Image: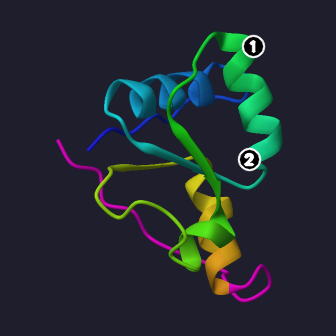
């Protein structure tokens, strides 16, 4: 599994988009229109970009790998923004 954990404005989204494109995957994010614009500016085309809601509603090609932008925002979106108050994460070596 790929994990991109870096500071704000460090290129995380671009890295994740590149991985989605290279792996014929689906990029899942909060604002697909803005991310399509950003991907185009990066010269990254030819991969699917969908919203968190599209994922929850299962409105995507189930056979492709998934790449989730801003995992914490995704979790809040799925659980309900005011309901998710904590989580744990295991660091794999």
Where in the figure is residue 77, as x and y percent of width and height?
70, 74
Majority SS type along the magenta span: loop
Q: Which residue in the protein does label 1 denote?
A: 41
Judged left or right of residue 9, residue 78 is: left
Disc number for residue 59: none
Judged left or right of residue 92, residue 39 is: right
Q: Quadrant of the C terminus?
A: top left
Q: Which residue in the protein does label 2 denote?
A: 32
Where in the figure is residue 32, as x and y percent of width and height?
74, 47
Against 84, is 48 above or below?
Answer: above
Tell me what residue is drawn at x 58 percent, y 80 percent.
Answer: 57
Against 17, is 70 above or below?
Answer: below
Which mark sits nearer the N-terminus, 2 or 1? Answer: 2
Tell me what residue is drawn at x 57 percent, y 77 percent.
Answer: 56
Tell me what residue is drawn at x 79 percent, y 50 percent.
Answer: 31
For the record, the magenta segment spans 80-93
Where in the figure is residue 74, as x and y percent of width and height?
62, 64
Frontmost residue, 69 versus 53:
53
Frontmost residue, 29 versus 9:
29
């Amino acid at each position: 599994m790929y994990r991109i954990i870096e500071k704000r404005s460090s290129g995380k989204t671009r890295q994740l988009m590149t991985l989605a494109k290279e792996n014929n995957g689906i990029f899942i994010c909060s604002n697909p229109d803005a991310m399509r614009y950003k991907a185009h500016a990066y010269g990254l085309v030819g991969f699917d970009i969908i919203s968190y809601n599209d994922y929850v509603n299962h409105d995507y090609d189930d056979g492709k790998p998934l790449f989730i932008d801003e995992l914490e925002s995704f979790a809040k979106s799925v659980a309900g923004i005011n309901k998710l108050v904590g989580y744990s994460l295991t660091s794999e070596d």
